[in-house]
Image (cartoon, rainbow, N blue to C red):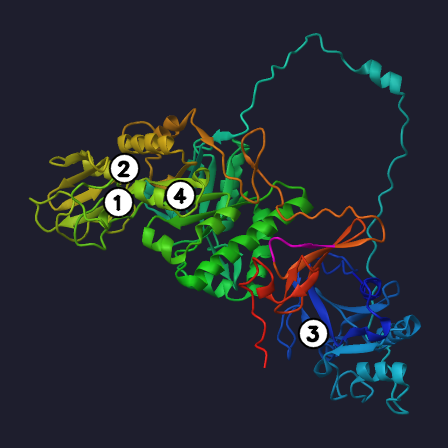
């Protein structure tokens, strides 16, 4: 990563030196240091430096802005190995070019026979001559012209000696602790000290099924559950760490288009949730972003700018690693239209590729990528490219609930497994069974689909107390629960209280395979142990990958209903015991390991095995606009010029319509 190497590579690849014009920047790249006492090249940084007063871009300063920084207290450091300077002021660091480094580069251009210099850009040099000093307009470009063309900037023009103008402070050397001298230990003496086991152990080998895995149990915990009053208050301390395979904390938010904590208490909550792994090391804990209240607009804004989206991806990795989460759950409610559909795929693709790459470089287990998606067939059609998102997601959490609620003027069940025979053709599509089949029909692999199981019910106020069957008229939502405090909504433990009041009638709907209850003008449709066990039996019969529970904090976590804590989740877990999910999906990132869990492989991996001096070209299967160049055993990821894609048949960058599979990229201009 240097000017010399980049130019030499162009020559090596066949470019004539006299046509190569070497780029010279009139700006610097800035960073915010993690520790202002450590500022040498490659010191840790937290991100880009503060934006310039005039250029107004974080991580970027025009040369005249660097000059102002140097004239206002920044220290100047010349790196004699790289032949470039950098400046430091507090926690602000900027690497740039000045007249001294420019003259070094011009001498190198002449010594190597290159064709000249290209300046990006003339407007970021000190064009007024009033900022950097010496009353010299365009000091950097003028220095280039002097060196390359012998045209003087004027008899009084002198280079600014920044080492004299700006102060310089040596970086403190780290204290070197003298280590004790090594002690020689006899190998034979060490071996004699080893205690030999007095028992022989035999390890039984058993055949491992490579094509299946146990069902997954995703349990969401909501950040607002800790704010419920009295016995409804739920914190991570209430969670049984062995109840679920995955815990998903909902929700984080976006701040300046970056993944961030939603409240001041979230950091404490994150730590408490992560601490559950101390009691169950196999527990995976994910952070969810989005949700119904968050809406779609922030996701639209995030994905509307590629740079912004990429920044989000890498900042997300940093936050997830800092808090020790196992992955990210994307809850965009909901993408609609072709633009959103493409943006959603791109977001998931960028996250997955970044997660893959980070795992390889960090040596840590790859971060998981999951998403909560709608059950509605209309919502699926409106915003989801199902085959594409299936490539990038580890698990797809289908929200098979909220099929009916207080927004309707007739009572309907929250989460019916099957439809009523008398229902309209439209109503028959509003069931768990139909929705799950629709996801499969659209291209989702069954083993990735987690079927949503609600631990709450939807309630209504009846218009006529004598009419209480499904479809009866309703005036609105039922009375709020004592703890959840939301009209039309009751947690399972609140439903338990409702059922225990005198004159309450409990009904099992044999067609929909779910219960509902009513008393006077109050009606609630919910799931109990019987209906959830029925759903699990259906799930196993169909071969789905597991369950997603919304939410763990609304099950009877105190054992209030009948003595057993978490009766709903525990009954589902019991029904899933021994069930094996068949793994048949052969996506670009999946392969089966001996444990039947997903492991990663890079579908676009290009291995360079050429002889030294030999060059070959290979297409990037994930991006038409890039290709790989193998130079011996070295691999380079190269971009095509704007609007072109790589043509593997010709080994050239070509117009998209000439390359099969890449026709959707920008088309070539019309010929006159």
Task: Classify mark 2: residues with Cα within 10 Å, few (<14), some (14-19) or many (20+).
Answer: many
* Numbered badge on residue 210: none
Say if 35 sits above or below 144 in the image.
above
Task: Classify mark 4: residues with Cα within 10 Å, few (<14), some (14-19) or many (20+).
Answer: some
**x then y, percent, for residue 377:** 33, 51
Q: Are marks 2 and 1 in contact (CB under 8 Å)?
A: yes
Q: Which residue is mark 2?
A: 527
- Nearest-to-viewer mark from 3 and 4: 4
Quadrant in which the N terminus appears? bottom right
Task: Classify mark 1: residues with Cα within 10 Å, few (<14), some (14-19) or many (20+).
Answer: many
Q: Which residue is mark 4?
A: 440
Q: Which segment is the magenta one?
A: 617-623
Q: Residue at x 52, y 48 (%)?
A: 392
Q: Residue at x 35, y 42 (%)?
A: 437
User: Residue 77: in sight, yes or no?
Assistant: no
Q: Which residue is mark 3?
A: 61
Q: Are marks 1 and 3 in contact (CB under 8 Å)?
A: no
**x then y, percent, for residue 653:** 67, 64
Q: Which residue is mark 1?
A: 414
């Amino acid at each position: 990563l240097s000017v010399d190497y980049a130019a030499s590579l162009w020559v090596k690849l066949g470019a004539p030196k006299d046509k190569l014009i070497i780029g010279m920047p009139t700006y610097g790249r800035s960073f915010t240091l993690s520790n202002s006492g450590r500022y040498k090249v490659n010191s840790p940084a937290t991100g880009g430096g503060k934006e310039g007063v005039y250029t107004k871009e974080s991580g970027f300063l025009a040369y005249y802005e660097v000059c102002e920084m140097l004239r206002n207290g920044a220290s100047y450091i010349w790196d004699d190995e790289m032949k470039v300077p950098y400046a430091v002021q507090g926690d602000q660091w900027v690497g740039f070019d000045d007249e001294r480094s420019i003259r070094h580069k011009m001498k190198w251009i002449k010594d190597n026979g290159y064709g000249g210099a290209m300046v990006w850009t003339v407007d970021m040099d000190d064009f007024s001559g009033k900022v950097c000093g010496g009353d010299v307009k365009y000091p950097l470009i003028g220095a280039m012209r002097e060196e390359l063309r012998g045209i003087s900037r004027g008899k009084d023009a002198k280079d600014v000696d920044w080492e004299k103008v700006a102060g310089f402070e040596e970086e403190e050397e780290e204290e070197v602790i003298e280590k004790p001298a090594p002690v020689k230990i006899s190998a034979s003496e060490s071996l004699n000290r080893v205690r030999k086991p007095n028992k022989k152990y035999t390890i039984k080998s058993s055949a491992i099924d490579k094509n299946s895995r146990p069902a997954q149990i995703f349990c969401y915990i909501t950040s607002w559950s800790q704010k419920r009053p009295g016995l409804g208050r739920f914190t991570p301390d209430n969670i049984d760490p062995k109840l679920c395979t995955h815990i998903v904390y909902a929700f984080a938010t976006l701040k300046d288009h970056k993944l961030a904590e939603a409240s001041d208490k979230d950091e404490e909550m994150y730590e408490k949730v992560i601490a559950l792994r101390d009691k169950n090391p196999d527990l995976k804990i994910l952070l969810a972003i989005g949700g119904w209240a968050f809406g779609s607009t922030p996701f639209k804004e995030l994905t509307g700018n590629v740079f912004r989206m990429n920044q989000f991806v890498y900042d997300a990795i940093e936050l997830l690693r800092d808090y020790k989460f196992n992955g990210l759950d994307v809850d965009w409610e909901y993408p609609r239209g072709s633009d959103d559909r493409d943006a959603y795929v791109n977001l998931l693709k960028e996250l997955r590729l970044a997660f893959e790459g980070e795992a390889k470089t960090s040596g840590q287990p790859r971060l998981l990528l999951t998403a909560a998606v709608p059950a509605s067939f209309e919502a699926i059609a409106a915003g989801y490219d199902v085959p594409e998102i299936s490539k990038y997601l580890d698990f797809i959490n289908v929200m098979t609930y909220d099929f009916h609620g207080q927004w309707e003027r007739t009572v309907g069940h929250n989460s019916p497994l099957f439809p009523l025979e008398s229902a309209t053709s439209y109503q028959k599509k509003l069931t768990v069974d139909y929705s799950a089949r629709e996801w499969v029909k659209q291209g989702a692999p069954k083993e990735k689909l987690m079927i949503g199981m609600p631990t709450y019910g939807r309630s209504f106020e009846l218009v006529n107390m004598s009419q209480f069957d499904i479809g009866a008229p309703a005036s609105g939502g039922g009375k709020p629960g004592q703890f959840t405090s939301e009209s039309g909504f009751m947690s399972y433990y609140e439903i338990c209280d409702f059922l225990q009041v005198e004159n309450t009638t409990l009904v099992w709907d044999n067609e929909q395979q779910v219960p509902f209850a009513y008393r006077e003008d109050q009606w609630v449709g919910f799931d109990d142990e019987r209906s959830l066990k029925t759903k699990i039996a259906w799930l196993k019969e169909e071969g789905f990958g597991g369950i997603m529970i919304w939410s763990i904090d609304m099950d009877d976590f105190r054992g209030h209903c009948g003595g057993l804590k978490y009766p709903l989740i525990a009954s589902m877990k019991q029904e899933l015991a021994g069930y094996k999910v068949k793994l048949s999906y052969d996506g670009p990132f999946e392969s089966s390991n001996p444990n039947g869990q997903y492991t990663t492989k890079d579908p676009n991996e290009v291995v360079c095995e050429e002889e030294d001096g030999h060059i070959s070209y290979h297409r990037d299967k994930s991006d038409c606009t890039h290709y790989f160049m193998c130079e011996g055993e070295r691999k380079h990821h190269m971009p095509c010029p704007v609007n072109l894609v790589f043509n593997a048949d010709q080994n050239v960058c070509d117009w998209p319509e000439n390359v099969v599979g890449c026709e959707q990229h920008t088309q070539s201009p019309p010929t006159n």
